[in-house]
């Protein structure tokens, strides 16, 4: 028993050492071989299964198909963990197969459902078990993951593809001044609406009659509420019943992200530079301040405008609900929008993207007052990211794989396949023409690209709570939100409870450690990252 | 005399048959759907209400966008068979001992020892999994079939012992006594006189072991990483944020097949009546 | 090479299963152990076989202690009252099983097995599994298996008790023949039926409450039962044992008239005794005598056992032939005084009638 | 109680089977109300089938069953109003003795007070009146059998009580008292009783009339005395009595049976031609060993010469086996009778009146 | 006899040792970790005295999860027992299609719980699932199966009952098939109808099997968490959280190993005490049915 513990502690210790000495770890230098893929050749996925016939040209560079095919990794096994198929999981499997063909490496991929991914990653990492070489996971876990990650070597940072990644997403990949995550996806929350419903003359007339306002894409959360209530119960083009809003509300799903979207405009004061979740100085939680409470009130109030089961929707439900035309509005990641724009979608090109709704007032935690000013914030919610484990014996092959995964040709194709869940993260991706080529209407494409691009320039930014123990904080938050939505507690009570728990979590995890990490988040928010 | 008991019997059977079959029927029809047949409104009948496609079935055998279930299937089979076999061997030996000899370990007598075995099932998996992790890590058995087999044996052993003790209790002890008198050591008596006559008990034990072994998701999931994936793991990996209902359905059905064979087998023993006493 | 049981004592849950049992069992002889259920017969066999431990005492084979010899090295064959065979083997395989365990070559084993099956008349069924045989046939297989081994010790634990009446009679006859060929084997056969014990045994061991009550030839046991317990258990119906007194020329037995003191009772002091009245020594009729009420009539085909109430004393009478009497009838009882047994008050035999003028 | 009749009843479990293989061959039988019958025969003789037909667990494939003239051929057991005592004691383990006895009456919806009265009366008779509130599962096996019987007896209108080898699992020492009790109860309550057993001993002790069955046929019915004294077939002669009846094969010669050099006088002359095969049946009890010349034997006795090959000690009696030519004769003698040495030659006295003639296995009719 | 004694050990030891080794370490580990603050940020065996337990005492979520379990496990096992028994009775004796039905009825227990729960999740989907759709066709308004506490309980219990009633049925059927015929004949002879026969014969005879079946199922049901995880994630709010699921959240999802250890330990003790009491009560309750042999 005691020996076991000693062994465990020793293993954990040795792992820390390994991490400290990182950089010396990579032992599998690639042998050169004859390139098997022609420079600038056509890249297509069609030989790998039922994929679009689209081809694209291989873009020259160290990560290209051509360059990769000149590497010989035969005898090397890469152990890769990724999310379940199809989201991220499917491209991981696909690129693993391609990488394997090009280099001779053996790539074993395991796909894990979202709810299990964190523990599946963190348990072996902490125990010093060299379980994975390459890991794909949500970027907000960086605080917990960072100690176990291999920083991205300079030569990869210098590639053209990496240099084109937007600032926001490079910020996301950085910890303590080091780029430890390899960007493969860009994510944010924004608003999606059904234009056919919003522009339907009868709807417009009735809305005007009922509310005295014009029916349009909501710009504030109260307008969102009003429009959602109005549209609930109306009929769509095929006579199908429509509900106002689809949101992620399932407690142990991604509800915390949805709630942060709703809270951003109420609680992220453009002038308050001291933190969104906490007061960065005192580490006092701000989660139960009036801005957050108001957002939760809104969240609770939307329930009647949700589809059946809408108070237990996971992300998948939200995507299918909006993408399938059941809900008129929705806000979260790109997926629902891309789903609505699939070639066989009933509402293709009947949708538009827009910034998250804003508010007419915003809580200033520094003054402790509501400021009556219109406010809006961009929520760079977590997206998928990738990294190489410090314990990996094959760091070079691992980075080459990620580099190949995200090369220009692959990304161009991946972005087109909605279920892959890979969304624009390079400046090159913010181009309406690219989307129009996919058959999107000019309006849809433009609204999409503009929305994303505008977010990049929004100075009022919210990032996830990128600190160690983030899952505990978010789990606690989701539990509080769910309790309020289930009517078990009032919004204030629920969030007071969350604040209490957050304090306890901070104590447990270590206040200094959390605070140090949180200061980095605040820097990101303030654009100082 | 009224005929209502007969009627109640048929009513119960019909209702329960429908209830039992419902998820399977739903999974079968769903496995032939695609995203359009799932969205919007509920459909049941292929061709009439939606255009059936074999896509989901292609996907579970390695088609694009799916997961290949063949490898995990083989893993599951190997692990289940090996673990069940070991659990039954160890379990049968222990059960035979407990049925035939009197033990006394401290204050514990035979009944208590049997209870000790069975009581292991009380342990919630969550309690066991982290220690198991470290237990397997030391000899480097994480992410290996062997490691998983060892853990599965521990989970199955109580079941095997429970079934077999009662079964052996029902075999006249004179048979093995006689074998001993006829020159068999107790071990030979067990192997030559008892085991050949224990098919029903071994079958039931094997069934329970196979069911619990095959269906274990929790431990398999947490004690392997990339090298060993079992079927439930692979199927559950489909049930993430955007569950492809069709693939999930096909996968669920695929995973049931081996156990369906088992159900038929068990029923045959039941019908022959020689499970009597094996499950008590 | 005799088997000696030395003061075997075994207590289970505060109850003596065996209480200081000492016996010498000779090869080539049939020892029948007679006693009621619970008398310790089975315990004795199990100890001899090594299946049960004893608290004290030892079993010696040719003077060698068997204490540490496990059952599988004792060369003991056993036939149980349940028909125990290996269900998965055919009759022939069953008989061969112990031979093969004893490393007898296959051909030889098969020959001997077939021979044994023939002895018990099952040649035609040698391919059947026990499940397809009737109870009698199953027990024959078990007996054949025990015989074919030519074990040094052959134990039979009430082998016939679960068989049909006629089958039992038949097999009992056959056993006599089968045992005659056992040669150097020590045979121990337990039974609750006196006729069976007397008929099969070269030597009868009567057990009572875990103790050996008497050992002797059938004639000795029957004619001079050492105790009242033995007297009851070797007679069917059990001997009537009633308190009485010797008074000069008479024997006074409760309920009966004063009986003349027969010659074999001479030489005993007057006083209280237990008087054993064998059921056949009583006769009933319509003539003069003490009147008794019939309480129950049992008919065994050729004999009638009449239970009577003699002024509060229960007696059983054994009469040849079938008598048309029924419960409630009043009959007069007479006793043949020359056939009375006399036991001291603690149940030890004092005097027995001179039996069978042989 | 009722009179039970079986009209041409037969049973086969496989329709279309050869009638010679039927479990129960066609049978006419009337069982009188209030009498006790024993159904005896070796295992597999059809007695259980017959019992099941009476209890209604088996509907006969042929024929009609009536109780007091009412056709009950297809009436379910529950409605036949019979009682049965099984081989293994069957009691309601969850109930007390009282509830066990009351159960059949409750099923019939009797009022509480009447039930109580009746139960008490029966318990009294069973000798269990003191333990009415004891859980039935605590009783010993023989007491449980009494309860089973009692459940039949509480119903004063019970059509018949069926007993299926009720003493099998009873300790030998307890058999006598239970047998006695059962007998007493049936005398007292006088139901129609059908008692199934393989044990002639029990059958004779218990029943007023025995029905001997073999291979699905009813071979003979009669009182114990009839079966003993004049078995209708060699089977019954073999089956009833212990040891079995002796059978000496011979040929008919001048009204007697020629067995080797012996001419055995028969009780009567069978109506078959001279020279036909005839078997002499005589009980071992009736044969006398003639002591060396002491008793020449009179005209009522045939003297037969043979060699004594074995003597079995049965305690009170001995059974001598005597080889007469190539046939065996068993002689049962009382213990006090002197028996010569094994191996010596003896003369046997066969009383003429006890030498029954059998032809083709059946008792020959009186030919005169 | 020494030789026999040696074999005695030979039979039991391998199994017992295997189990002992595999169980004892986790147990000791859990006890120790319960007194540490091991969590994701500092995975270490430090000593924080009883802090975890103090926290636990005030953890309403944990205690209410225990209450939820009582309702869920108790309710489902009871229903499983009743239906399982009824089904066993129904397919026991001659009935048309008996063998097919038996196979069909056995299948659910053979299926993987997490996987079938996912199928049920589709079935209970409030707008796209067949349950609400079919209810709608007979005019019943959509039921918020997974989002309202009452229906969520019903949904969870439905799935559990669907999956595990076959287990009960199997045990009860095997028990029925091993029963002697005589008691039933006796009851028929005594004139008992089907109900009375059940009450007085079948039920008491199966009492020992019932006790075993109920206890085994209670043990298994006490670990209920897969179904909860897939169907409701413990929601709405935390209305359907079971200890198994709550432990999972704390221990694995949030990696609060130390705290989860203290919860596990407490839960384990609670379970052992509760199950011991329950089995004693069951044995006693059924003993009145049958003087246990």
Image (tube, grey):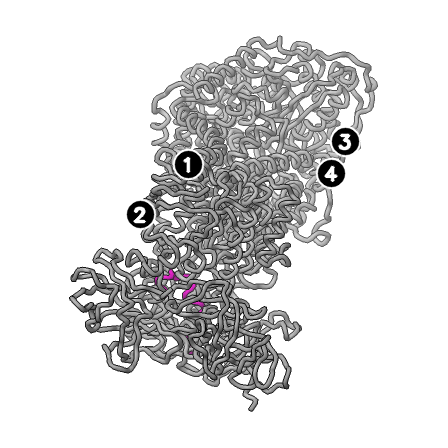
Name the residue nearer the viewer: C153 or C103: C153
SS for dot 2: strand
SS for dot 4: loop
Above or below, C324 relative to E33: below
Residue D248 placement (x, y as % from top left): 56, 74
Residue B211 placement (x, y as % from top left): 57, 42
Q: Quadrant of residue E65?
A: top left
Looking at the image, is mark 4 or mark 1 nearer the viewer?
1
For the residues labelled 3 and 1, say whether their Cβ atoms are less than 8 Å apart: no
The reply to the same-chain question for discs 2 and 3 is no
Residue found 60% across the figure and 83% down from its top: D253
Residue for badge 4: A343
Above or below, A123 relative to C248: above
Residue segment shown in magenta: D159-175
In this rendering, would A353 be left or right of D97?
right
* Label at residue C15: 2
Instruction: Read off the chain for label 1.
Output: C
């Amino acid at each position: 028993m005691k020996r076991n513990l000693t062994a465990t502690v020793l293993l954990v210790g040795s792992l820390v050492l390994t991490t400290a000495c990182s950089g010396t770890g990579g032992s599998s230098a690639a042998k050169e071989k004859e390139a098997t893929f022609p420079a600038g050749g056509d890249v297509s996925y069609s030989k790998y299964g039922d994929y679009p016939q689209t081809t694209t040209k291989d873009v020259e560079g160290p990560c290209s198909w051509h360059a990769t095919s000149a590497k010989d990794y035969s005898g090397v096994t890469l152990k890769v963990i990724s999310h379940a198929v199809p989201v991220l999981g499917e491209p991981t499997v696909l690129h693993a197969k391609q990488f394997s063909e090009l280099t001779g490496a053996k790539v074993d991929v395991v796909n894990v459902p979202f709810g299990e991914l964190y523990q599946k990653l963190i348990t072996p990492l902490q125990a010093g078990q060299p379980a994975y070489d390459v890991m794909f996971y949500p970027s907000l876990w960086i605080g917990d993951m960072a100690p176990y990650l291999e920083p991205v070597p300079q030569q990869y940072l210098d590639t053209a593809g990496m240099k084109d990644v937007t600032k926001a997403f490079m910020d996301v990949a950085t910890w303590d001044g080091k780029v430890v995550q390899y960007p493969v996806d860009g994510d944010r929350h924004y608003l999606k609406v059904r234009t056919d419903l919003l522009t339907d003359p009868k709807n417009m007339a009735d809305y005007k009659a009922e509310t005295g306002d014009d029916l349009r894409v909501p710009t504030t959360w109260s307008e969102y509420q009003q429009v959602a209530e109005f549209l609930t119960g109306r009929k769509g083009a095929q006579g199908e019943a429509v509900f106002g809003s689809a949101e992620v509300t399932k407690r142990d799903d991604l509800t915390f992200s949805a709630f942060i979207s709703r809270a951003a405009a109420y609680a992220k004061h453009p002038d308050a530079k001291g933190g969104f979740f906490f007061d960065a100085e005192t580490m006092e939680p701000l989660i139960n301040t009036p801005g957050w409470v108001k957002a939760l009130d809104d969240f609770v109030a939307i329930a009647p405008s949700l589809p059946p089961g809408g108070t237990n929707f996971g992300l998948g439900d939200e995507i299918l609900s909006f993408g399938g035309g059941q809900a008129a509005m929705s806000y979260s990641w790109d997926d629902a929008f891309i789903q609505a724009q699939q070639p066989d979608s009933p509402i293709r090109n009947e949708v538009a993207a827009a910034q998250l709704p804003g508010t007419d007032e915003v809580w200033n935690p520094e003054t402790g007052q509501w400021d009556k000013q219109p406010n809006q914030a961009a929520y760079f919610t977590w997206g998928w990211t990738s990294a190489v484990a410090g314990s990996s014996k094959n760091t070079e092959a691992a980075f080459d794989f990620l580099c190949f995964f995200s090369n220009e040709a692959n990304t161009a194709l991946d972005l087109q396949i909605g279920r892959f869940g890979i969304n624009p993260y390079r400046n090159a991706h913010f181009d309406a023409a690219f989307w129009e080529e996919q058959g999107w209407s000019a309006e849809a494409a433009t609204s999409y690209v503009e929305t994303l691009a505008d977010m990049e320039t929004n100075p009022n930014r919210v990032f996830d709570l990128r600190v160690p123990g983030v899952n505990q904080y978010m789990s606690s938050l989701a539990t509080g939100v769910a309790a309020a939505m289930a009517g078990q507690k009032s919004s204030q009570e629920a969030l007071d409870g969350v604040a209490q728990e957050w304090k306890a979590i901070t104590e447990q995890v270590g206040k200094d450690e959390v605070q140090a990490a949180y200061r980095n988040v605040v820097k990101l928010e303030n654009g100082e990252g | 005399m009224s005929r209502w008991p007969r009627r109640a019997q048929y009513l119960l059977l019909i209702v329960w048959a429908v209830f039992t079959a419902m998820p399977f029927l739903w999974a079968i029809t769903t496995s032939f759907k695609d995203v359009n047949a799932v969205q919007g409104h509920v459909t049941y009948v292929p061709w009439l209400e939606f255009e059936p496609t074999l896509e989901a079935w292609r996907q579970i055998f390695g088609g694009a966008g799916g997961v290949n279930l063949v490898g995990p299937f083989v893993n599951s089979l190997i692990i289940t068979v090996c673990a069940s076999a070991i659990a039954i061997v160890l379990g049968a030996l222990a059960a035979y001992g407990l049925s035939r000899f009197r033990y006394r370990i401290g204050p514990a007598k035979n009944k208590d020892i049997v209870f000790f075995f069975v009581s292991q099932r009380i342990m919630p998996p969550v309690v066991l999994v982290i220690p198991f992790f470290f237990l397997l890590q030391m000899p480097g058995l994480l992410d290996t079939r062997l490691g998983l087999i060892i853990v599965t044996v521990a989970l199955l052993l109580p079941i095997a012992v429970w079934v077999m003790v009662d079964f052996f209790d029902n075999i006249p002890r004179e048979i093995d006594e006689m074998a001993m008198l006829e020159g068999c050591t107790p071990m030979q008596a067990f192997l030559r006189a008892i085991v050949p006559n224990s098919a029903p008990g071994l079958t039931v034990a094997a069934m329970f072991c196979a069911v619990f072994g095959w269906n274990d998701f929790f431990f398999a999931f947490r004690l392997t990483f990339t090298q060993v994936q079992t079927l439930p793991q692979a199927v559950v990996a489909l049930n993430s944020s955007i569950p492809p209902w069709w693939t999930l359905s096909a996968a669920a059905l695929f995973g049931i097949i081996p156990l369906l064979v088992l159900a038929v087998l068990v029923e045959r023993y039941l019908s022959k009546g020689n499970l009597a006493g094996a499950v008590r | 090479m005799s088997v000696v049981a030395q003061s075997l004592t075994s207590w289970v849950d505060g109850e003596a299963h065996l209480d200081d049992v000492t016996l010498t069992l000779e090869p080539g002889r049939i020892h029948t152990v007679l006693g009621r259920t619970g008398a310790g017969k089975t315990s004795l066999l199990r100890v001899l076989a090594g299946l049960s431990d004893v608290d004290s005492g030892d079993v010696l084979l040719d003077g060698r202690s068997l204490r540490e010899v496990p059952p599988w090295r004792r060369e003991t064959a056993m036939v149980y009252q349940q028909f125990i065979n290996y269900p998965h083997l055919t009759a022939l395989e069953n008989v061969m099983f112990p031979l093969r365990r004893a490393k007898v070559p296959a051909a030889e084993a098969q020959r001997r097995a077939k021979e044994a099956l023939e002895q018990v008349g099952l040649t035609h069924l040698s391919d059947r599994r026990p499940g397809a045989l009737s109870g009698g046939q199953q027990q024959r297989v078990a007996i054949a298996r025990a015989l074919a081994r030519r074990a040094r010790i052959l134990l039979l634990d009430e082998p016939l008790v679960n068989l049909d009446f006629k089958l039992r009679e038949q097999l009992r006859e056959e056993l006599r023949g089968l045992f005659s060929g056992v040669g150097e084997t020590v045979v121990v056969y337990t039974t609750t039926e006196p006729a069976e014990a007397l008929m099969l045994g070269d030597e009868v061991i009567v057990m009572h409450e875990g103790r050996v009550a008497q050992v002797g030839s059938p004639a000795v046991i029957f004619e001079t039962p050492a105790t009242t317990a033995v007297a009851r258990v070797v007679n069917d119906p059990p001997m009537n044992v009633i308190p009485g007194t010797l008074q000069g020329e008479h024997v006074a037995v409760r309920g009966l008239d004063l009986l003349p003191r027969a010659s074999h009772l001479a030489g005993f002091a007057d006083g209280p005794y237990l008087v054993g009245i064998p059921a056949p020594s009583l006769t009933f009729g319509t003539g003069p005598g003490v009147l008794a009420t019939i309480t129950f009539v049992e008919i065994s085909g050729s004999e009638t056992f009449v239970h009577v109430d003699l002024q509060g004393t229960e007696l059983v009478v054994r009469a040849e032939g079938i008598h048309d009497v029924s419960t409630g009838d009043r009959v007069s009882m007479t006793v043949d005084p020359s056939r009375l047994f006399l036991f001291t008050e603690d149940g030890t035999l004092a005097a027995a009638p001179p039996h069978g003028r042989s | 109680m009722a009179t039970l009749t079986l009209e041409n009843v037969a049973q086969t479990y496989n329709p279309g089977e050869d009638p010679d293989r039927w479990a129960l061959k066609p049978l006419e039988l009337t069982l009188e109300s209030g009498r006790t019958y024993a159904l005896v025969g070796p295992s597999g003789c059809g007695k259980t089938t017959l019992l099941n037909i009476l209890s209604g667990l088996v509907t006969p494939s042929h024929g009609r069953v009536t109780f007091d003239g009412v056709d009950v051929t297809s009436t379910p057991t529950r409605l036949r109003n019979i009682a049965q005592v099984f081989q293994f004691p069957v009691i309601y383990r969850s109930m007390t003795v009282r509830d066990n006895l009351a159960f059949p009456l409750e099923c019939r919806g009797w009022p509480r007070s009447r039930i109580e009265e009746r139960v008490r009366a029966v318990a009294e008779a069973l000798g269990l009146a003191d333990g009415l509130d004891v859980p039935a599962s605590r009783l010993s096996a023989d007491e449980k059998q009494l309860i089973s019987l009692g459940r039949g007896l509480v119903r004063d209108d019970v059509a018949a009580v069926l007993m299926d080898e009720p003493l099998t699992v009873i300790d030998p020492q307890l058999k006598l008292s239970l047998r006695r009790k059962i007998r007493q109860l049936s005398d007292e309550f006088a139901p129609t009783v059908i008692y199934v057993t393989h044990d002639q001993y029990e059958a004779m002790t218990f029943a007023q009339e025995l029905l001997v069955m073999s291979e699905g046929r009813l071979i003979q019915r009669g009182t114990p005395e009839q079966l003993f004294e004049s078995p209708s077939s060699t089977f019954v002669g073999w089956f009833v009595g212990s040891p079995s009846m002796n059978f000496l094969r011979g040929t008919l010669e001048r009204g007697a049976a020629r067995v080797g050099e012996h001419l055995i006088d028969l009780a009567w002359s069978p109506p078959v031609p001279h020279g036909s095969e005839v078997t002499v049946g005589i009980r071992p009890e009736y044969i006398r060993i003639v002591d060396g010349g002491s008793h020449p034997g009179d005209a009522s006795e045939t003297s037969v010469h043979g060699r004594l090959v074995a003597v079995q000690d049965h305690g009170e009696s001995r059974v001598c086996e005597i080889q007469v030519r190539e046939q065996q004769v068993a002689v049962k003698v009382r213990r006090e009778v002197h028996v010569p040495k094994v191996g010596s030659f003896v003369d046997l006295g066969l009383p003429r009146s006890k030498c029954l003639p059998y032809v083709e296995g059946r008792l020959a009719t009186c030919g005169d | 006899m020494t030789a026999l004694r040696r074999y005695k050990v030979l039979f039991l030891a391998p199994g017992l040792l295997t189990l002992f080794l595999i169980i004892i370490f986790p147990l000791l580990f859990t006890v120790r970790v319960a007194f540490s603050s091991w969590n994701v940020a500092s995975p270490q065996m430090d000593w924080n005295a009883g802090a975890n337990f103090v926290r636990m005492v005030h953890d309403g979520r944990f205690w209410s999860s225990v209450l939820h379990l009582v309702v869920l496990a108790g309710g489902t096992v009871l229903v499983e027992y009743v239906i399982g028994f009824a089904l066993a009775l129904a397919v026991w004796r001659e009935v048309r299609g008996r063998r097919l039905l038996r196979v069909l009825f056995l299948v659910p227990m053979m299926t993987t719980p997490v996987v079938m729960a996912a199928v049920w999740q589709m079935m209970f989907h409030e707008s796209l699932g067949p349950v609400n759709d079919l209810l709608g066709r007979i005019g019943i308004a959509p039921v918020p199966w997974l989002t309202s506490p009452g229906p969520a309980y019903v949904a969870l219990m439905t799935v559990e009952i669907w999956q595990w009633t076959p287990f009960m049925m199997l045990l009860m059927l095997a028990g029925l098939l091993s029963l002697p015929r005589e008691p039933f004949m006796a009851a028929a002879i005594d004139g008992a109808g089907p109900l009375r026969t059940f009450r007085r014969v079948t039920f008491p005879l199966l009492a020992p099997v019932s006790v075993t079946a109920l206890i085994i199922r209670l043990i298994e049901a006490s670990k209920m968490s897969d179904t909860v995880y897939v169907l409701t994630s413990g929601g709405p709010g935390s209305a359907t959280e079971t200890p198994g699921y709550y432990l999972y959240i704390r221990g694995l999802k949030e990696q609060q190993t130390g705290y989860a250890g203290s919860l596990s330990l407490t839960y384990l003790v609670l379970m052992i005490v509760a199950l011991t009491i329950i089995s004693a009560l069951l044995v006693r309750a059924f003993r009145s049915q049958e003087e246990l042999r």
